[in-house]
Every structure is written in C-alpha cells, then in structure tokens.
Amino acid sequence: MKILVTGGAGFIGSAVVRYIIENTQDSVINIDKLTYAGNLESLECVSNDERYTFEQVDICNRTELDRVFATHQPDAVMHLAAESHVDRSITGPAEFIQTNIVGTYNLLEAAREYWNTLTNTVKEAFRFHHISTDEVYGDLPHPDEQEGDLPLFTEQTSYSPSSPYSASKASSDHLVRAWLRTYGFPTIVTNCSNNYGPYHFPEKLIPLVILNALEGKELPIYGKGDQIRDWLYVEDHARALYKVVTEGKVGETYNIGGHNEKQNIEVVEAICSILDTLVPKGSPYSELITYVADRPGHDRRYAIDSSKMSAELNWTPVETFETGLRKTVQWYLDNQTWCQNVQDGSYQRERLGEINMTAKGK
Ligand code: NAD
C-alpha cells in the first residue's frame, strides 16, 4: 500500500510513519506544514528509506493537495495533521478552526475528487482514516463525585466538547462522517486517549515535567492535579492505527485507550520517582511540584472503553503505564539534543492558555 500520512512530522504522526516503514512493506508519503509542533528530526531513522517521501504541504492549500494526490496516487489516507494543544486553543483558537476544520474539509474534498477518478477495484479498497481524540466526548464523572463503577467513553457516547481544540476536532469528525453518508466516501474514525512517549513536544505534561525537573525548575500542576486521563504509549497507538487502516471496517468508529486511568498528580509523582532513581540529585524531585491556577474549562476525567478494538481487531496495548513511562523518561535523558532543537527560542516551556477575564469586564 501507499499511505498518505498528514501531520507525519508531529508526535503521533512520526510514530505512525516510523511504525509503517520499520514494520511493514508499505510506502509513506508524509505531508506536513512543519508548524512549531512538526519536526523532521523525529523521522531521521526513516528519512533515507526509498519507501518514504516527505512534502512540506499545508492541508489548507487545496491546489497543493490536488497536486499531491495526482502525483503520489495513494491507496489510503491517515489524517493526523492538526493543531493539538488545548492551552494554545484557549489563547488562539483561529488556527484550530483553520487547520482542524477547514483543513480537514479541504483534505476530504481533494481525497474524494481523486477517489472518483479511480477504477472500481482500487476505489473499493481506498480508505480515509481520520485520527481524533476522546476529548470530543467532553468529560466523565470523577470518583470524588460518584461512587461505584464509573462510566467509560464508548463509540456511542454523545459528543460534548469543552475546549476550542476539542470542539474543532468534533467538527472535523462530523465532516468525515457526513462525507461517508452523503458521498459514500470510505471513511473510518478513531478516537484515542492521551498519548505519551518519545518525540513529544515539551509543551505537554509528561515531557514538560521531565525537562523542567532535569533543569531544577518548578513542576506546574493545574488546580488540584486530580484530573484523570487514560494514558496510552504512543507506539501502541501507532500499531492500533495501522490495524484500523488495514483491517478496520468502512463507516466504523473505534475508541483506542490504554486502560491506564491516572490523576495528573500521580503522573508527575511517578516521573519524579523514576528520576530519583535514574538521576539522583540529593533531594526528591517532587519538591519541585508547584500548584498553579487551573486551565479554564478543564475536563475532569477521560477514560476509554476500547473493547471494540480488542474484540474486532485483536488489538491491546503492550506497554503498562509503568513500563511505558520508564522508557519515556529514559528516552528524554538520552535525547537532550532533540529537546533543545525543537524548542526554537520562541517557546521556553512557559505557561500557556490563561485568559484574563477581568480585561473584558467579565
Ligand atoms: P502534534 O501537534 O504533535 O502534531 C501535529 C502535526 O500536524 C505537526 O507535525 C504539524 O506540523 C502538522 N500540522 C499542523 N497544521 C498543519 C497544516 N495546516 N497542514 C499540514 N500539517 C499541519 O499532534 P499529535 O499529538 O501528534 O496529534 C496528532 C493527531 O492525533 C491530532 O489530530 C490529534 O488531534 C490526535 N490525537 C492526539 C492525542 C495526543 O495525546 N497527543 C490523542 C488523541 C488524538
């Protein structure tokens, strides 16, 4: 297969590209705008492979998309390109509307026009796989609000996004499903929980905490740190995505999760204790933990029921939270140059996503 991956220079996209090149016979055409979050250094291990091609393309540019489809004639699209950071969406939602909604619309239209030119057999085998998030479902009851078994997100859970990021992803999911229903365009959607692992841009919780700790800086915890996320190691996600694009059923949605519900504070304490062992500094790293004002609109709990993925596609995560986190911390210790190179001077791990309510008289 020739797979067109969008956003392949980002955190999850680069894991998908590395997975395909290193574990299958398929070819990859990676199109990426290379925003602050896209880094070709994450793809150095595959960049010389003859089955790998990169083109710097913005998915909002329809002319360029048409050229890419005509030139490379892909058999499938895996769409990961997006603005992905909730805090950035709070301070600057415009880019999220543009890339996540308008960009997805452009890609759907370019892909559909190309698909219409294919012969029947190729057309039937074509897949458009849209990669989305569990944040589209909003949040779930938290253990301090409800006793007993708590609900999980299933493929039937209603959409109720809370942030500009999750609302833009929800919009793009709706577009993708509408293209299936209206045009018969062969789409599949996956909604995944929080990923962690190597090559994660240091604005997100886990890499930010590792790098701040190593530099003796404060480890900021939003609110009480009791928000719960279901953590999945990125390589487990990449393997799941490849299974979906090759074996998933057209028109279906698959929820992907790690069975690892953890409070943010537990995640930060776990990183501190791994660092205490690997890079002891005389006093515990947890002394650097500092509580800061919560994120506006912060969802309290996400958790995924991924039983459909295991029953229908025989996928389960390989890493536990403990093994995956240890690997991740070790990777950041071993790859300090990557960390320095991706922080280009315009972002120094400062707090993002605060809003000044009083400035607008609210
Ligand atoms: P990321 O921010 O690390 O990477 C996004 C990539 O998209 C970057 O390489 C960036 O350069 C590229 N991009 C942005 N705008 C573009 C545009 N207009 N045209 C072309 N390329 C563009 O994001 P990620 O964490 O790798 O997430 C990938 C996808 O998976 C996103 O769609 C996200 O919503 C989804 N997702 C992420 C998580 C998570 O925990 N990170 C969980 C579930 C789903």
Image (cartoon, helix red, strand yellow):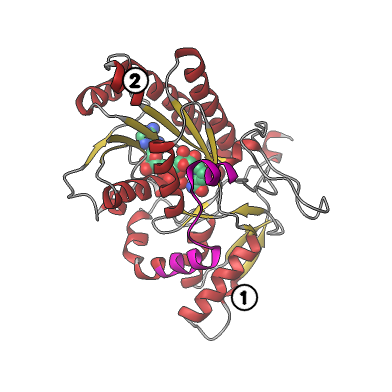
Q: Residue at x 48, y 19 (%)?
A: 180
Residue 80 visible in the shown view: no
Mark 1 residue element: helix
Q: Which residue is mark 1?
A: 287
For disc 1, the neighbor class at 10 Å (few under 14, some 14 to 19, many from 20) is: few
Instruction: Please state, as top left, top right, bottom left or bottom right, where the C terminus lies in the image.
Output: top right
- Residue nearest the viewer, comparing 141 with 314: 314
The quarter of the picture where residue 119 lies is: top left
165 lies above or below 121:
below
Q: Which residue is mark 2?
A: 110
Residue at the spot 59% in from the left edge and 45% down from the top edge = 307
**Viewed as shown, does residue 48 lie left or right of 101?**
left
Q: Residue 311: say if magenta.
A: yes
- Identify the residue shown where x is 51% and y is 22%: 175
Q: Is residue 142 left or right of residue 194?
A: right
Return the x and y of residue 274 as percentages of the image width and height. Answer: 52, 74
Q: On residue 334, which mark appears?
A: none
Residue 200 appears in which quarter of the rendering?
A: bottom left
